Amino acid sequence: MLMLVLLAVVHSYHGIGMPPQEQAGGTPTPIETPALVEAPEPDRSRPLGKLEAGEWVSTEWGGVRCEYPASPRARQIAATLQSRIVGYVAVEGRDIGFAVHDHSADVVCSFHPDVTFEMASIVKVATVASLLNQRGLAGLSAAELDWARAAIVWSDNDAHDILWGLTGGEEGLRMLAAAGGLTQTTPGPDGMWGLGTTTAADQLRLMDALVSGTLLGLDETQYLLGLMRQVVPEQTWGIITQAPPNAVIAVKNGWLDVQHWAPDGRYLTTTWTVNSIGYIQSPEVNYTLAILSSGHDSEESGRNYVEEVVAWVASVLTAD
């Protein structure tokens, strides 16, 4: 029998947080929140992986699927990304799903976009979005704004437990999923928000909806992306890999440790889940990215693997 044991802290509310090592200590120097720069509006009638014949091109190589308008530039981006990334996503013992949207050319490429993974702390973005969707930025108290900041900037589990309760917990996540078209995102059992599941496709939809301003109002969008742009340095890894030095980066990462046991009770291995979602924007690039993974033997190896994949994706999107 497979047993999942989350190394977590049980808090006073009905959520269960991530492993204690995800909590970052210290208080960062305040950072001025940059203004949101509007990205080209993607076609929201086009769900990931479901294109109408004749309007878009869909190609697949080694499991990496790309969908894009019939233009030479888009075709080149897709073909180059597929050829470079194929050797890095099929690694034995590790599961990975990613989805990337290059807004400049409207190219969407993905690998295992519909495979589910535990959310870990990337769920905190959806929770804060749910609260903003329900109440609006003006409707939040100073304390609630502080909790939202702590949940995103420091990945504070105690603050997120409070926000989880304020949004209605599982129902709040379902409401946000319905508003954002996240059809593959499910709350965790018994209030264990970190064990809720999602897919790379859904997380890309969430980031695209935030960037385009189709999920929240302008003030709410700027606020949430602004928090994601102020994440403490020790948690700014993953999708930021190989971003241009002048890029404005909105990121949220999550990681958790799941233990596997044999039917006879013997401990087998430790399998880490490592996720990273966000938005990279500069004069040279403009893309959203979601990468979810599991099967790592440590947090460090999971982060390294995620960043190897991200580096190859970024090398294509940042090329002249």
Image: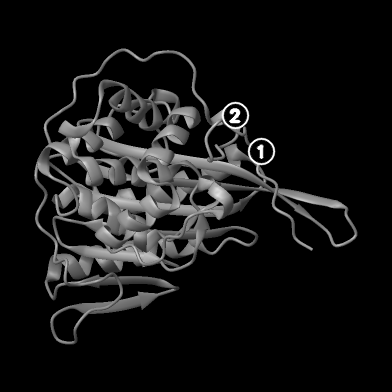
Mark 1 touching mark 2, by CB under 8 A?
yes
What residue do we see at 17% from left, 78% from top? 56
Q: Tag 2, which secondary structure? A: helix
**Relative side of 131 to 87, left or right:** left
Query: Mark 1 highlights which residue?
Result: 7
Q: Residues within 10 Å of mark 2 (few under 14, many from 20)?
A: few
Where does the image place residue 320, in percent across and percent down from the top left? 17, 49
Type of amino acid under label 2: Pro
Residue 147's quadrant in the figure?
top left
195 or 205: which is nearer to us?
195
What residue do we see at 32% from left, 22% from top? 143
Q: Residues within 10 Å of mark 1 (few under 14, many from 20)?
A: some
Query: Mark 2 highlights which residue?
Result: 20
Height in image: 46 above or below 242?
Answer: below
What residue do we see at 20% from left, 31% from top? 246
Height in image: 175 above or below 235?
Answer: below
Q: Say whether disc 1 or disc 2 marks the residue closer to the N-terminus.
A: 1
Q: Does residue 248 appear in this view?
A: no
